[in-house]
């Protein structure tokens, strides 16, 4: 099973950026943890990060045919990325949305996810564990759909 793991704007700055909200793990350390979890789950992970919505959309469009699902932390695109929403919907793949911080406990504008209606699950507020639980949920969902 192949899973795209996509990280949006500013997530390349993890470990330095607002550790009170996002923790001290770097994007590289999160990817390493996901790689280990992915191996245990029988998943091949395809990592991508961009600070540009168009780059993320291009990646989704290029890789959709070779993937079984998408694990995404859209960063700030969560709140205004309507073209990202459309790309995820068009992909037709199961999507799990993850966030390091608890977006429901932050500023009002952060509570809005414009992609929430195209995801099978949203996990937030658990730092790196959000990603790990998101990967587990996505792998489980994909396996359950293949059994049907």
Image (cartoon, helix red, strand yellow):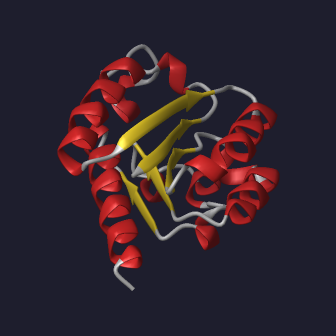
Which residue sits at x=29%, y=37%?
Answer: 128
Front residue of 100/135: it is: 135
Instruction: Decide which of 36, 50 is in the foreground and name it.
Output: 36
Q: Is residue 118 above or below residue 131?
A: below
- Which residue occupies the extreme left position in the image? 40
**Observer-nearest of 46 and 135:** 46
Up the image or down, 101 lies above or below 96; here it is above
Given residues 72 and 25, the one toward you in this image is 72
The residue under the point 52% across, 20% down is 12
The residue at 69%/26% (across/down) is 51
Image coordinates for residue 66, horizontal then vertical, percent: 58, 47
59 on left or right of 93: right
Q: Name the image quarter holding the C terminus.
A: bottom left
Residue 49, relative to residue 104: is it above or below? above
Q: Tally the marks.
A: 0
Residue lying furthest top:
16
Q: Quadrant of residue 23?
A: top left
Q: Is residue 16 left or right of residue 58?
A: left
* Spot occupied by residue 11 in the image (x, y as percentages of width and height): 52, 27
Q: Position of residue 41 (x, y in %)?
A: 23, 50
- Relative placement, left or right, of 58 versus 103 is right
Q: Position of residue 25 (x, y in %)?
A: 31, 23
Q: What's the residue at 41%, 23% (across, down)? A: 27
């Amino acid at each position: 099973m192949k899973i795209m793991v996509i990280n949006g704007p500013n997530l390349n700055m993890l470990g330095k950026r607002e550790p009170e909200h996002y923790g001290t793990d770097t994007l590289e350390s999160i990817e390493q943890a996901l790689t280990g979890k992915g191996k245990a789950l029988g998943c091949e992970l395809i990592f991508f990060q961009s600070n540009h919505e168009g780059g993320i959309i291009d990646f989704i469009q290029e890789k959709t045919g070779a993937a079984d699902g998408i694990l995404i932390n859209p960063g700030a695109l969560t709140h205004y990325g309507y073209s990202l929403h459309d790309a995820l919907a068009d992909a037709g793949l199961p999507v799990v949305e993850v966030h390091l911080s608890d977006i429901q406990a932050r500023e009002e504008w952060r509570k809005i996810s414009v992609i929430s209606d195209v995801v099978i699950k949203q996990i937030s507020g658990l730092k790196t564990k959000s990603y790990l639980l998101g990967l587990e949920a996505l792998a489980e969902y994909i396996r359950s759909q293949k059994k049907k």
